[in-house]
Amino acid sequence: MARAAILAAVCVPALAFASDTPLYQPAPAWVIAPPPVPTNAAEELPPIVLLDFQKRIEGDRLWSYVHQQTRIASSEMLSQAATLTLPWAPDKGDLIVHGLTILRGDRRIDLLAKGQKFVVLRREQSLEQRELTGILTATMAVEGLEVGDILDMRFSVTGRDTALGGRVQDVIPLVAAPMRIGAGRVRYSWPKGTQPKWKVIADGVQATPVTKGEFTELSFALPLAKPKEMPEDAPSRFRHPPLMEVASFADWADVSKTFATLYKTDGLVATGGPIAGEVAAIMKADATPLGRAQRALEVVQDKVRYLAVGMDGGNYVPQAPAKTWEVRYGDCKAKTLLLLAMLHAMGIEAEPVIASVGMGDFVPERLPSAAAFNHVFVRATVAGETLWLDGTGSNARIADVRDTPGIGYVLPLRAAGAVPVMVSTHANALPMGIVTIDADESSAVDLPSAVDVTFVAHGVVAAQLRAAKSQLGPKEQRELISNVLQKAAGEGQFADGTITPDPVSGDVVIRAKGVVGTSWGMEDRRRKRSLNGPLSDLTFSPDRSRPDWTAIPVAAPPPLGFERRLRIRLPDGGRGFTLDGTADADQRLAGHVVKRTTRLTNGLLTMDERVDALGVEVPAAQIAAERDAVATATANIPHLVAPADTPRRWTLDSAGMAQSSQIKAIRAVYAKAIAADPDEISGYQSRASFESGVGNYRAALPDLDRVIAKEPDIDLYLQRAYVHDMLGDRTKALADAESARRLDPSNQSATMRLAWLKAENGDLPGGVALLDQRIALGGEQKRAARQDKAALIGEFGDAAEAVKLYDAMIAEKPGSPNLLNGRCWIKGTRSVMLDTALKDCTSAIELSDSTLAALDSRAMVWYRMGRYPEALADLDAVLAAEPDMASSRYLRAVVMKAMKRDADALADLTMARRVAPQIDRQYARFGFKM
């Protein structure tokens, strides 16, 4: 659609039937010549050469004239601009085409004179948004248009809306920089005896009405100056587009009175009719006004589907309740009138209010007119309490009837008139979603978590899930369950999933068993578990650093709440586990309320947390304090701290694994997930990773085989190569590494793994040749390939040669802890140059942020030097921070054996072999035998 057509469609008001075909007439006499287009030989004309809006108000009719010239600057623009679309509402006025000309140098090609005509279509492009507009669209495929031409189009749309009671209103979004146009203008005129109100809501516009003969004119040039940049989180009154508004309403009270007449309910509920029957049933079922109001709202929401009808005067005029009930559809106007009629029939005080969804805080700054609003709903009063009842909502129940919409200002529609009032908001009675997670982590803190998850969806989310369940097949429902629960409980696999609507509460309950990744991690040499709930999703980091932003508040999200209930069964009955952070909370943070209780008793962690947005802005003066408060609160979210000797997966022997409820539950979920959809590979892949992680490599192989057969990739081949290696089958491991590299010879991980396996299989020259190829290619991988080559030769070849390679790299990049540690490791493992090895390791430790690898290397040097206590001290430090580091545990076994601590040595050796079954093979290369 041409931009002028878009703007014209926007600016024509929602205004009696005229014509359903476009008219071809000259422009009206009041139209004046367009503004001149500046010419500059050094500058190319912009794509929009001219954009001229001229509008005349005559009584209750608005005539909108548009003159647009578009330069066809490219073939892409030609394909877009060569199809014209001009929409208009035939029940409000006419589309009149005044001219369509191609300007080609000095030639003027009159397309209308050549017989080209518009074709009228009714396309209803908004049906997917449940909107029936009645808009007609005049379309034309312009013939003969070429790149370099200027397409000159002039048309008008007239409009009159009887719902406005003889008044006129208009809103134009104004073109502003950085958009370029050659010349532009907005020009309004009206009889000088009438004085419609007007307002330019934009910075820097100088416009003053002037009288010319019998008419008053107001005009200004386009484009406007670039609007001031505003923070993304500013309220809409700071971030609205530039607008020009014109209206003949006297004030807000006039708007209110004019539209109040459309919502009179006298005689709308016919005695003995179906609506009267619904009213009688409600009054019989519930004796309380509050309950009756809620039941009436439920009827309107659940028994009448939403469909906006904007034709035949329907932009502002609501459909009669009897018609709404007959067809069982209606828009906000129809639903509001039906609800009002039912409430009034039950003696409940209620009135309609109109609102601006998305720009509610901007209403008081706008010109009084109906164009400031895009929604209508009901305000009811029961026992002195205000209820906001929206028939276009869904799933409202008695618990929700006191909820408040975050909609800003509303205008009550009253016969006596009214002014806009701000809707005072508070937290909703019920959260939009409640997730309950029962987690079995009773065997080890580094295993995946086996969970039973229940997600209770309320309100609009429940309505969406209920609709989805009715439309989706079994596979799609499983995917929906997985998507919902992964957001609620974490990434993983789920099985036995169900979606169960509750017709009484209106809620929808999703349940499933699952396996999600562990939330335990190492911090300060202790195993800790995050307990992040809804509060962790609260971010508050508004930028008010610019001087002209310091007084701008932060926009309010609408009232909305989420709650999580977490239960975790801990290892060893919770022995030695502690809780850090703020266990309980009841505080207000940046327009939200946070409530939390956390308990740790008898091996069970329980944590309930709910966060509600209140729908209130954060004043500018409070932003800094609120930012600090949110940062403090999120930093103090509780977390679990495990004891130093907490069970890990490699501390479980075969009997412990067989008895583990956590492992049994994990395997059951994987089996059921795979059985439910045998063609989905993610279940096999997850199970293979789990079995490999617990050392059950042979069980992982069939799943990896199946996944690779269907969707091979580098990571999967390398994963299977690792499994084969752990099982001692280096031939198959080598074959998988070769397959991985064939998929992408430039992949560094695949190249290094293949080089390593070649060397292990006795082909060190072949491994080195692979790395030399990468080095010769240069680029980003050269440095890593040089280091890989030095490490490979140091492990399997000439230690002195490897040290020389490291010497050269360190000379180029002195002080690199990674290179220093690599050189130290070779000297230590190969027992060469021990006098300088210690210095290398110590320097690496001093220069590195992560010291574990260098400490492990230095321990090897200490051992080679016969300084066992120093070696043990370094290894103890490594294993305190990373208990499952197999190389350090193996070396500590060697050191302890040398210190005659055979029992301790055996314990460490057993653990090292569980973590890395081929650890003996590696250390045998260094002369160790245990």
Image (cartoon, rainbow, N blue to C red):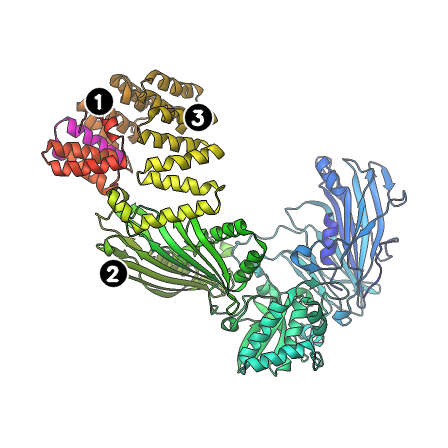
The residue singled out by tag 1 in the image is: 830
Task: Tell me if mark 1 has few (under 14), some (14-19) or many (20+) residues whose alpha carbon lies within 10 angstroms of its own.
Answer: many
Between marks 3 and 1 in the image, the one whose residue lies nearer the viewer: 3
Residue 892 appears in the figure: yes
Measuring from the top left, give residue 484's x and y in whole percent: 48, 54
Measuring from the top left, give residue 473's x and y in whole percent: 56, 51
Between marks 1 and 2 in the image, the one whose residue lies nearer the viewer: 2
In the displayed structure, 72 sits above or below 309; it is above
The residue singled out by tag 2 in the image is: 602
The residue singled out by tag 3 in the image is: 739
289 displayed left or right of 77: left
Q: Amino acid at mark 1?
A: Arg
Residue most toward the left? 900
Task: Tell me if mark 2 has few (under 14), some (14-19) or many (20+) residues whose alpha carbon lies within 10 angstroms of its own.
Answer: few
36 displayed left or right of 827: right
Q: Amino acid at mark 2?
A: Asn
In the displayed structure, 297 sits above or below 45; it is below
52 displayed left or right of 771: right
Residue 36 appears in the figure: no
Measuring from the top left, give residue 822's x and y in whole percent: 28, 27
| Residue sitting nearer the eye, 712 or 38 | 712
| Residue sitting nearer the eye, 586 or 284 | 284
Mark-to-mark CA distance, 3 and 2: 51 Å
Magenta segment: does it hold 860?
A: yes
In the displayed structure, 871 sits above or below 803; it is below
In the displayed structure, 384 sits above or below 905; it is below
Measuring from the top left, give residue 419's x and y in whole percent: 62, 74
Mark-to-mark CA distance, 3 and 1: 32 Å
Q: Which region shows up in magenta?
A: 851-869
Which image quarter is the C terminus in?
top left
* Residue at horizontal 25 percent and vertical 60 percent from the top: 602
Mark-to-mark CA distance, 1 and 2: 51 Å
